[in-house]
Image (spheres, helix red, strand yellow):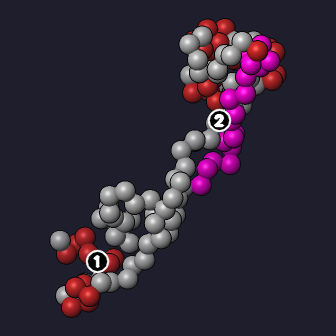
């Protein structure tokens, strides 16, 4: 409860707090280059990418059909029709939290869900 009330510890990523579920309408996007890009060592977000965002991505029927560089195109305003890429950041580790009172809280008759209002 303390974490949910803004009194958690720095660096904690809480597992017990309900994390927002990804929108069911979002797409797990990839950044798959086409064969030409692979052969020429081009990355979806490389130095030539601004050309792709303006001229390829959703602007080219072959790219649209294959969805090359899907995530990079989406993140740069040239996403494919119907795509709503899901967020990429996910916590790698978390802290299991409880609302167990420590001894000091017990002696002061404090409860976790009332703690912020007592400060």
Tell me: residue 110, above or below residue 11: below
On screen, residue 16 versus residue 116, left or right, reads right
Quarter of the view holding residue 28: top right
Report the disc number at residue 17: none
SS majority, magenta: loop
Quadrant including the N terminus: bottom left
Say whether marks 1 and 2 touch (CB < 8 Å).
Answer: no
Relative placement, left or right, of 22 versus 66 is left
> What residue would you read off at disc 2?
84
- SS state under label 2: loop
- Position above or below: 29 against 110: above
Tell me the magenta residue range.
21-38
Q: Is residue 33 above or below residue 16?
A: above
Q: Nearer the viewer, residue 42 or 57?
A: 42
Task: Report the residue marked by disc 1.
Answer: 114
Q: Earlier in the sequence, mark 1 or mark 2?
A: 2
Q: Splitting the image into 4 quarters, where does residue 56 fall?
A: top right
* Rendered-image quadrant of the C terminus: bottom left
Q: Quick one: label 1, few (<14), some, or many (20+) residues within 10 Å?
A: few
């Amino acid at each position: 409860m303390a974490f949910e009330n803004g009194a958690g510890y720095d660096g904690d990523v809480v597992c017990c707090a309900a994390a927002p579920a990804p929108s069911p309408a979002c797409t797990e996007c990839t950044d798959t280059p086409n064969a030409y890009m692979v052969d020429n060592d081009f990355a979806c977000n490389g130095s030539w990418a601004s050309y792709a965002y303006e001229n390829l991505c959703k602007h080219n029927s072959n790219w649209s059909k294959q969805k090359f560089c899907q995530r990079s195109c989406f993140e740069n305003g040239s996403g494919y029709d119907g795509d709503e890429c899901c967020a990429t950041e996910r916590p790698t580790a978390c802290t299991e939290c409880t609302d167990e009172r420590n001894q000091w809280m017990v002696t002061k008759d404090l409860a976790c869900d009332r703690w912020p209002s007592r400060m």
